Amino acid sequence: MAARKKASAPAGGPPRGRAAKSRAKTKAKTVDNEVTRRNQKFDALTVDLIRKTAGTVHREIRDEKKPDLAFPVRSLRNVSYSQKTGYFEMGRQKKVRTLTVNTVKSFAQTLRMMGLSKELVEGNDFATKRDAYYQSKNWEEARFDEQAESDTVMDDIEALFSVQGVSREQLRFIPDEHGGAVAGRLVVLDPDRETGEIERIDCTRFGSGAYSIPSSVEQLSFETDAKFILAIETGGIFQRLQSHKYWQTANCILVSMAGVPTRATRRFIRKLSDECRLPVYAFVDCDPYGISNIYRTLKVGSGNAAHLSQFFCVPQARYLGVTPQDILDYQLPTHPLVDVDIKRARDALKNDPFFKTHKPWQKAMDQLLKMGVRAEQQALAKWGLNYVIEEYLPRKLEQTAGFLP
Amino acid sequence: MAARKKASAPAGGPPRGRAAKSRAKTKAKTVDNEVTRRNQKFDALTVDLIRKTAGTVHREIRDEKKPDLAFPVRSLRNVSYSQKTGYFEMGRQKKVRTLTVNTVKSFAQTLRMMGLSKELVEGNDFATKRDAYYQSKNWEEARFDEQAESDTVMDDIEALFSVQGVSREQLRFIPDEHGGAVAGRLVVLDPDRETGEIERIDCTRFGSGAYSIPSSVEQLSFETDAKFILAIETGGIFQRLQSHKYWQTANCILVSMAGVPTRATRRFIRKLSDECRLPVYAFVDCDPYGISNIYRTLKVGSGNAAHLSQFFCVPQARYLGVTPQDILDYQLPTHPLVDVDIKRARDALKNDPFFKTHKPWQKAMDQLLKMGVRAEQQALAKWGLNYVIEEYLPRKLEQTAGFLP
């Protein structure tokens, strides 16, 4: 793995003190193993793609032609849902940005941003959207005035490379948001950024705490004998299952999503499920938000970010509960559906390709609307705080074939 | 440690399946060590306090007197800031709830809630606010109709016992929100809920991930040779310092607050700092929100929750940066202050006892208002993505005596 390269500093020179002199750089050490080889191969591929894209532009300029870049259109109009792949897919519509007097600045910014990505991959480093914006302050005329501009350019580049199967995280642009928490029968293998040595992180050994997923998970691999992944909406239920070591009883891996799962959390579940062939069961509140926002986003992605779905959605996820039928079967305390709930459910039934494809979901949503109520997963506490562990989950897990799709 | 007691199930009886029969309870095993002894002692004290409070009520009823409970008034009017203790303190005002025909329901609910707390301590379990609300569905006439009601009763009980130095977490009512992330030179000791065996969690061994703080940290203890705790506002900076193992270079512990720190995160920092005598340095954005909300809440608590300050604030915290002066010294890219920023800064100067007490903060806030701009901690990326590691932090840490109070 390459030794750390310093990100470029501006011409004027930043304020530097004595501190810099006293630090020696750690020498990079190659560690020969499968994880490192796989990561290096992927990095080489990414750099190669950036080079090719830039090379084409360069050649056209030398041939005195007008170079252009074609980005996939990122909008709901350009999205389709295929039951076969299991997620929202981007269509073939492209927007073409040609180098002209009017586009010269954004064209230059796009190329600089690609250059930053190449530098990051080669230096084995990363940048958040905000980091990239501030880095640009040192790009002279190509600097961004607002972060919104640099975000758009980054989204375009992400869409451009996603067509070739390269994700934003592989371009080393990482989200600023935290990841979810994980506990259970899982060892995470994480190569050290500088030495490549593998850290083995045993997720059974965190007491009442948990493993916090890093912003980027591309470099991780896994060892596990668990039978499934349980993706949980609320921190409260996660803490209960973790403190009572439910993962030991049920032989599983617990992931706390804390609401709509972040990119890192979705990618982590997807990668873990793919690589270890584990089923994913979602355990969320029974309301239109839990079903059509949290669960649907986890499973098939969201409409306006379909270029991400191939990396981030978890098409193999299934819905354990809480289901509308559970409200009746377990006599759960409920709250009435409010207007925004009803609107959200009707919208899903009418416009969302996912719900339009799956009959069982249409029936479940109709049932919820007819009942006119919603129930939280913690409502099971009515029957005792640990009823969820001792009764609800074991009973549900006897009938996984009956889970909603 | 007591074996797990089942939380009571309602009279009607919940739906139970075959699953329950096949599970044997793990037998509790006493582990003789200091952590367990300390926790057991504290639990015994908590149960004793609950017993005494309930005993007084019981005695008065038997003597045919009207029993009452006196709760501290939870409001800004009943708060003072002392530089000596270093946090907002609750005053002596009390509201008295006497058992009458009108108050019988809330009086009964208060006693049931105290009973639930006693059950949780004795069973070594815990409940979130939401759990407690749903548990009450099984209290017949004492059930709560809305969670807002049960939250108020819980807050009252918390205030009542805080006067005796017992926190809500010791009453086993835990927050639903996740804790922050931790990495660095720290071993967390966490006793198993059932067996009391100690799990040793080495926070240097999380690769690019981190240790996720549990909802309640009372049972934890620590081993460390670190020199300080660095409390960081953004996930992006935390991920950078963690991935580059800054904690190794600087011999410290990194904590990601992800905005205003949660209760669990603040309590974790406080406990770690107290028990290991470590200074705490805050590293946040230079804007009125970062200073007067994030930093001030971390250090002295917040006005309307002064009964929590004794447990949750970190009076030993000091402000590393980003300071208004840093904006000049490091020529940072800025954004203009907007109206809400200006209002927040003026409010702090005029009304906040913390800022009114500390002259250096008044000067710094005045400087920020005069400059009319704010800067994010990631703005340091202008000078290179790792400038924060290689230059900014080392230079600041050479002058800790100059940190804002």
Image: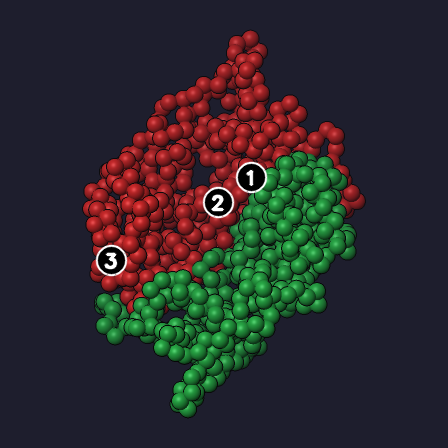
Chain colours: A red, B green
> Which of these two is toward me, B30 or A100?
A100
Question: Is circle 3 on the same chain as circle 2?
Answer: yes
State the residue position of label 1: A128
State the residue position of label 3: A326
State the residue position of label 2: A217
The answer to whether residue A214 shows anywhere in this view is: yes
Residue B106 appears in which quarter of the rendering?
Answer: bottom left
Give the alpha-carbon distance from disc 3 to disc 1, as whole Å.
42 Å
Q: Residue at horizontal 29%, vertical 51%? A: A337
* Chain letter for the residue marked with disc 2 in the picture: A
The percent position of residue A102, horizontal first and vertical second, equals: 55, 15
Q: Quadrant of the C terminus of chain B?
A: bottom right
Q: Residue at horizontal 65%, vertical 48%? A: B346
The percent position of residue B390, horizontal first and vertical second, equals: 70, 43
User: Which of disc 2 and disc 1 is earlier in sequence?
Assistant: 1
Answer above or below: position of B330 versus B179.
Answer: above
The answer to whether residue A33 shows anywhere in this view is: no
Contact? badges 3 and 2 (CB < 8 Å): no
**Mark 2: amino acid:** Val
Circle 3 SS class: helix
* B172 displayed left or right of A136: left
Answer above or below: position of B220 versus A47.
Answer: below
